[in-house]
Amino acid sequence: MLRVILSLLAIFSLVSHTAIAQNAPVPAKDAAAKMTVPEGFKVTLFAGEPDVVQPIAFCFDDKGRMWVIENRSYPGWKSEGHDRVLIFEDADNDGKFDKRTVFLDNGSNLSGINYGYGGIWLCSVPNLVFVPDRNSDDRPDGPAQVVLDGWDAKAQHNVFNSLTWGPDGWLYGCNGILSNSRVGAPGTKDSDRVALNCGVWRYHPTRKKFEAIFHGTTNPWGLDFNEFGQMFVTNCVIRHAWHVIPGANVERMFGQPFNPHLYGLIESPADHIHWNASEIWSDIRALGVTPTTDRAGGGHAHSGAMVYLGDNWPEMYRNNLFTCNIHGNRINRDKIEPVGSGYVLKHEKDVLFANDPWFRGLVVQYGPDGGVYVSDWSDTGECHNYVDVDRGNGRIYKVTYGTPTRKPTDLAGLRDADLVSLMFTAKNEWVVNHTRRLLAERAATERLDAQALAPLQSIVFNPNAESKSKTLERLRSLWTLYACSAIGQASLGKLTLDDSDQVRAWAIRLIADGNIDKSSLDFFIDRARNDPSPVVRLALASTLQRLPIADRWEIAKGLVGHAEDASDKNLPLMIWYGIEPLVAANPSRALELASAAKIPLIRRHVARRFTSLVP
């Protein structure tokens, strides 16, 4: 009888979904009022059709205005030049735009956007392009400049996306699984290009350097950073989120990693899934969202990542991960809790139900006043309709707790010293992130007053910084100094002995970004042997892959001596990824390393790799 009831419910769900899907979505003017949010929250329609259609990505400039991509190329990725970039301004901060400007109307295959360094950066398959607007008149200064090329349009809906400035000054992005791209600056020969499929990459705007830093997942679409600068990505189909550890290889939906000798992939930190474990992807396709999957969170398909660090929503939501659940027409929420070297993600109550089967949330971000913006592709089909494409709709909503009390400020108009002071006074990390990037831009063009950074130097090297709030201020300051090229290797080396394990870990990561000298290697060896924090040891394990083979041995020897790391979710495999090339380079020395290792996985994998060398 129970099976019969569940079957009837599933059929009813399918019939209801099909019937509704044949009609139009909830009218844009009514959609916000139809949504369900926790008590005290409200939703407004920031922009909707016909003012915006197909909003695939958005970002904000330093005035707090929203820049939106209208994607008309997908599906098919036809380079016909019909994609647009729009600017929306909400001058009275009532949650609805007042002014709309068309910045660009001839874009092709646009899937990601961010603002900075005198223009906008766009994912424009097969290229990463930069469109300059250095006089800030909201008109391109000239044609788009191709910064990188080599992304493959065969990736379909798995193309590169989610351009996000990291706290270290790099521009980060995601990449999907359906094709192998080979990325480099225009004219780069194939042997010098970076191989890339599913994972995360980054590009430095002044060093002109590109790296693939994280491999695995399926179709990651959305990334963000927590208060300690640790990155998380949202993923579609398999588990919905990962902690992005530089150099990590994580579970993937299909295919093989580039390195055949990994022997293991790191699992998602999520301790839950948002669907009934007995149901698979094909069930969703055939039956729609069943009651059990609905209760679990809505389904397999996710897009958009936001770690809320704004100043409008209640404190209980701060540092939580939010992601759009496409099948469930809602926004899921995970609590991020530190465990060992990393984190565990725990399911909390969902925060928004669209109550509209056409709702297809793609992007979720907090903005300049702490309010949260959500873009809606507004479509039918499994995740979206590949056949009967409706390019006439799309919405962007704003979700606030009550009425935000602070209006956006033109940060670009502030003096250097005023920007620096925001590092200590702004609770909204959006303000801090834009401030940091502005200071880095001024430093890159020699327009920055070096004396303005003195307060940051003072707090970074403050020995009395034991509280969490003080640690966060010091990290903000450290990242800003580094982004401005205002802290050297010697100073970073001293920070590897800091009282805060978060500061020590970041000092190691930032040293590894540059040319690692002998004194830095000595610091690394000492920390690998003696540091009590798994967070610091993870930073060292990640750094191994960035070092020449000859420089890895002593650090590896220190790391494999920590028996307490044997059960850690990340460390054994991360250490192995750094050690693996050593086995082929010097088999006998690698066996000595394995015999001294107190982590069983290291001993097993060294032995396995050794046997693969035997003819």
Image (cartoon, helix red, strand yellow):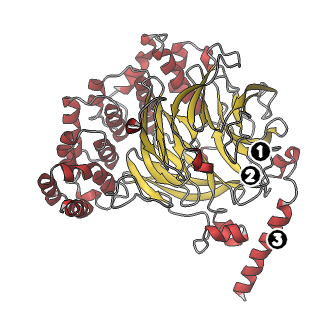
Q: Is residue 247 left or right of residue 111?
A: left
Q: Nearer the viewer, mark 3 or mark 2?
A: 3
Tell me the SS state at disc 2: loop
| CB atoms of marks 1 and 2 within 8 Å | yes
Give residue 407's quadrant in the image. Answer: top right
x and y, in percent, of residue 57 in the image: 66, 39
Q: Nearer the viewer, mark 3 or mark 1?
A: 3
Residue located at (48% from left, 58% from top): 252
How far is mark 1 from mark 2, CA to CA?
7 Å
How far is mark 3 from mark 2, CA to CA?
27 Å
Tell me the SS state at disc 3: helix
Q: Amino acid at mark 3?
A: Val
Q: Which residue is mark 2?
A: 37
Regarding residue 316, the answer to whether it shows in the image is no
In the orientation shown, which residue stands out farthest toward the bottom?
1
Q: Is residue 610 above or below residue 184?
A: below
Point out which mark residue 42 bears.
1
Tell me the SS state at disc 1: strand
Q: Is residue 596 left or right of residue 261?
A: left
| CB atoms of marks 3 and 1 within 8 Å | no
Q: Which residue is mark 3?
A: 15
Residue located at (39% from left, 50% from top): 248
Q: Earlier in the sequence, mark 3 or mark 1?
A: 3
- Estimate how packed mark 3 is, as few (under 14), some (14 to 19) or many (20 or more) residues with alpha carbons within 10 Å: some
Q: Nearer the viewer, residue 99 or 212?
A: 212
Q: Nearer the viewer, residue 201 or 567?
A: 201
x and y, in percent, of residue 440 in the image: 48, 21
Give residue 350's quadrant in the image. Answer: bottom right
Q: Amino acid at mark 2?
A: Val
Q: Is residue 515 above or below residue 267?
A: above
